[in-house]
């Protein structure tokens, strides 16, 4: 056995791997790789953003690559037609449709109604909700989908999305610090760009090895697209689940705030 030859092969492979990691760290290609999608090309785009914890049953799962998420959605499919009145829904799980089928969501009902505007344009609604309560999360998604030329944006929210402590608590926000920091600076938001809730990657985290999970998620998203296209399933509906509480305590306090007055800092 030629050990010298094997050693040369190993050293060259190691050198190439090191170079690949250096380039990966330098260019941070995940956002670009997220734009490579089989959705809307090989199979239909999803009717709502990827989210879920049971991919084996829902053919759907949560990831943090915003470009991959948006490009897997049906809104990225085609150029907006001149006779289309485009409506985008932004919001939390109620908009996304937890435990609801796609045709049972707000956007689903509007599309089923086949509405037209006074000038004859066909109303087409898109579900861009995402199941976490944070106005910052909504703003982040909104900043990416305005490129699809909406005529109307319907932003559904509850008071629970307003507390400052919740804004960066959404994993989707925390794992996209660059995008969120840009929005904070651009809109002079009263949020801390150095908030410890942001997931800041170390040099090792930025390598191919450190990014193996996000890279695998990009591949998995495409693979589950095949099952989504074949079945139309994007959510697991358990036979039994805990109902939302409606018998609430009589409490006038909200995140430390009490009536009757709120000051500017609140």
Image (tube, rainbow, N blue to C red):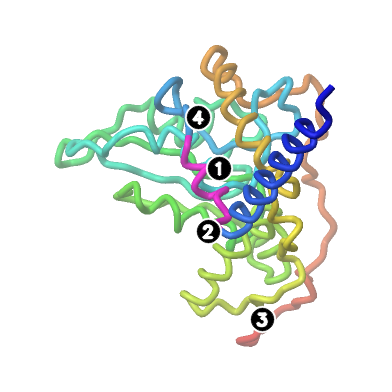
Count of marks overlaid on the render: 4
Residue at the spot of label 4: 46
Distance from Cα at disc 1 to Cα at disc 2 = 16 Å
248 horizontally vs 142: left or right: right
* Residue at 70% over, 24% down: 236
Counting residues from the start of the chain, the first of labels 1 and 2 encountered is 1
What residue is pinned by disc 2? 140
Instruction: Compare marks 3 and 2 and give the one earlier in the sequence.
Output: 2
Query: Disc 4 to disc 3, how far (Cα)?
Result: 38 Å
Q: Nearer the viewer, residue 135 or 71?
A: 71
**Residue topped by disc 1:** 95
Query: Which quadrant of the figure contains the C terminus?
Result: bottom right
Q: Which quadrant holds residue 169?
A: bottom right
Question: Badges 2 and 4: C-beta atoms under 8 Å apart?
Answer: no
The x, y position of residue 86, in whole percent, is 31, 42
Residues at badges 3 and 2 in contact (C-beta under 8 Å)?
Answer: no
Q: Which residue is at 56% across, 23% downward?
A: 225
How crowded pointer 2 is (Cα within 10 Å; few <14, some 14-19, many 20+) is rated as some
Give the magenta range.
Answer: 27-36
Q: Residue 28 lies in what quarter of the image?
A: bottom right
Question: Residue 111, image x and y in percent?
Answer: 38, 30
Residue 16 lies in what quarter of the image?
A: top right
Element under disc 3: loop
Closer to us: mark 4 or mark 1?
4
Q: Which mark is residue 198?
A: none
Cα separation between marks 3 and 1? 27 Å
């Amino acid at each position: 056995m030629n050990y010298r030859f094997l050693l040369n092969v190993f050293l060259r492979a190691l050198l190439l791997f090191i170079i690949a990691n250096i380039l990966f760290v330098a260019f941070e290609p995940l956002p670009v790789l997220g734009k490579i999608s089989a959705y809307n090309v090989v199979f239909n785009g999803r009717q709502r953003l990827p989210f879920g914890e049971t991919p084996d049953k829902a053919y759907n799962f949560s990831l943090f690559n915003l470009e991959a998420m948006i490009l897997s959605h049906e809104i990225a499919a085609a150029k907006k037609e001149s006779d289309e009145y485009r409506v985008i829904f932004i919001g939390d799980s109620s908009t996304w449709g937890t435990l609801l089928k796609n045709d049972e969501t707000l956007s689903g009902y509007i599309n089923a109604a086949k509405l037209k505007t006074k000038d004859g344009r066909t109303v087409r609604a898109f579900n861009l909700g995402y199941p976490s309560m944070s106005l910052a999360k909504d703003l982040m998604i909104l900043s990416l989908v305005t490129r699809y030329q909406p005529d109307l944006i319907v932003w559904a929210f509850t008071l629970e999305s307003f507390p400052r402590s919740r804004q960066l608590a959404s994993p989707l926000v925390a794992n996209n610090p660059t995008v969120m920091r840009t929005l904070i600076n651009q809109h002079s938001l009263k949020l801390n760009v150095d908030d410890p809730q942001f997931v800041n990657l170390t040099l090792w985290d930025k390598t191919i090895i450190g990014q193996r999970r996000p890279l695998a998620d990009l591949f998995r998203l495409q693979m589950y697209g095949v099952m989504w296209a074949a079945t139309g399933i994007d959510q697991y509906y358990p036979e039994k689940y805990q109902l939302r509480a409606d018998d609430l305590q009589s409490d006038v306090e909200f995140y430390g705030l009490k009536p009757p007055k709120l000051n500017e800092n609140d």
